[in-house]
Amino acid sequence: MRVESIQTGQPKTTGRPASPESSETPWTSAIWKEPVGGRVWAGSEGLSGDAQVHRPSHGGPERALLLYPAEHYPRWRAEWGIRELGPGGFGENLTVSGLAEHSVCVGDVLQVGDVRLEVSGPREPCATLARRHRRPGLIEQVVGNDRSGWYARVQHEGWLEPGLVIQLLDRPYPQWPISRAAQVKRDRSRAPAEARLLAACPALLTDWRAKIAGSPLNG
């Protein structure tokens, strides 16, 4: 398990006012992430030089870093019939190998060089990702194939760089792989008992816990 690439990005506005030639309107996002060379500081709010436009959904200490498996990219390229898609293509900060949504669990404590991370929950893909790739059905596709990526808190700040080995230090909640947690949240109205168990996991994203615990599980 290792860090293959590190990406940061700043807000970018794309699109043009609606006209007879185009129905696209301008929109702003920092989903365009570019690889950076050398060391990057990982603080409690994320990577130095990185930004998020919609912070309630994409930033803050509980979503300080977005991790995405490098192994997903060959599959996306094959399915889309393109060659260019690579690290940062899904807006992630760390492109990692040897980890995946079915093997990483909520609450996992990972050591990456001097940095210690705690996995906080699944990435819930939104319309921004579909707009970035101009693929209207992408969100449903990501949900269906469990290639969402996941968020992490920075428990101990420090420097990150590509090539660092990732070590699993602790796994307090092995019952909550990222893929299962995402599925349980989606199916909470059909499986309320399991949803309550997920909401009780203290390592899970706070807003997810509140949403699951406060939602009408019968509808």
Image (spheres, grey):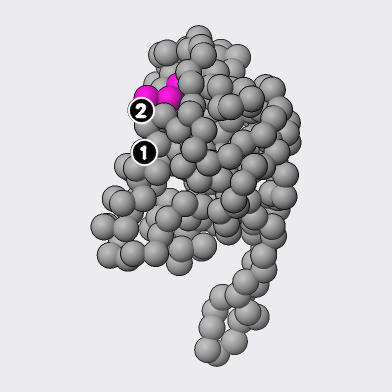
Residue 111 rendering spot, x and y as whole percentages: 56, 22
Q: Which mark is residue 146?
A: 1
- The structure residue drawn at horizontal position 56% and vertical position 53%, both measured from the top left corner, is 35
Neighbor class of circle 1 (other Cα within 10 Å; few <14, some 14-19, many 20+) is some
Residue at image point 56% right, 13% down: 200
Can I make out residue 150 in this image?
no
Instruction: Give residue 54's mark.
Output: none
Residues 136 and 101: in front is 101
Q: What amino acid is labelled 2 in the image? A: His
Q: Nearer the viewer, residue 159 or 16?
A: 159
Tell me the crowding category of disc 2: few under 14, some 14 to 19, or many 20 or more residues within 10 angstroms, Cα based. Answer: some
Disc 1, disc 2: CB below 8 Å? yes
Q: Which residues are magenta?
A: 101-106
Up-down relation of residue 18 to residue 2 (above or below): below
Question: Residue 215: image x %, image y %?
Answer: 57, 27
In the image, residue 64 sits, relative to residue 142, either above or below, namely above
Q: Is residue 197 magenta?
A: no
**Residue 72 horizontal side relative to residue 44, left or right:** left
Q: Which residue is mark 2?
A: 102
